[in-house]
Amino acid sequence: EAQCFVGAHVSIGQRSWLKSGVTIADYCTVGARCRFQSGVVIGSDGFGYEPVGQEIHRIPQIGNVVIEDDVEIGANTTVDRARFSQTLIGRGTKIDNLVQIAHNVRIGKQCLIAAQVGIAGSTTLGDYCVLGGQAGVAGHLALGDRVQLGAQSGLFQDVEANEFYNGTPAIPIGLERRLVVLSRKLPDLFKKVDSLASSLDSVRRPNS
């Protein structure tokens, strides 16, 4: 649609639909039947910098982005090109609005990624993963197939297949729920501890 930009050496498969204002930068590949909402940017430079002395130098991002068939991407989502090799979005994956996918991320097939998720560089997601809204995934992690991550979770470790993690730092959902229940009891627990401490003080205090 109107005001789209398609760079040099870009390949776009049949029946893909670019809404207004979509940008696809040089050398990127888009499969068939993809659908990109307004403001999507595919192939922007990854966030690659290196401190040198008192300055920060930019590292060239010379890879590309490969998006397989039947992928849908929501408005104003960005998918950064790889530093080397590819940033990959697997077949059938659906991505919501305002998502940031960093350089060299690899996302498997049929994943669901909700709004405002951020995935840092060189992280790999398996197939059929689900990431809740505003979840954050640190860089260089590996998530197995069918991993689920709750909304607003912050993940800082690898996760094996079929696990559901929640919270910040994200932990298995069963443990996280138990900790939430226990945390609600903390005020009463502290009152009991204070009461016991007062009783002990009175026992230890010499008679006047």
Image (cartoon, helix red, strand yellow):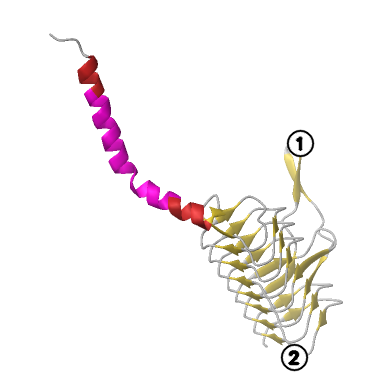
Looking at the rendering, in which quadrant would you find the C terminus? top left
What is the magenta segment's predominant secondary structure?
helix
Q: How many marks?
A: 2
The residue under label 1 is 53
Q: Residues within 10 Å of mark 1 (few under 14, many from 20)?
A: few
The residue under label 2 is 15
Tell whether 40 sits left or right of 6: left
- Assess whether residue 187 is covered by the magenta stretch: yes
* Residue type at tag 2: Arg
Q: Position of residue 134 (x, y in %)?
A: 54, 63
> Observer-nearest residue: 12 or 143?
143
Q: Residues within 10 Å of mark 2 (few under 14, many from 20)?
A: few
User: Which comes before the other along the chain, label 1 or label 2?
Assistant: 2
> Observer-nearest residue: 47 or 21?
47
Q: Quadrant of residue 98?
A: bottom right
Tell me what residue is drawn at x 26 percent, y 29 percent. Answer: 196
Q: Quadrant of residue 119?
A: bottom right
Tell me what residue is drawn at x 21 percent, y 18 percent. Answer: 203
Label 1 SS:
loop
* Residue type at tag 1: Gly
Image position of 42 with respect to 138: above or below:
below
- Are circles 1 and 2 on residues that touch, CB within 8 Å? no
Q: In the current view of this chain or complex, which residue is farthest to the right?
A: 9
Q: Quadrant of residue 99?
A: bottom right
Image position of 46 with respect to 20: above or below:
above
Q: Which residues are magenta?
A: 179-199
Tell whether 67 sits left or right of 39: right
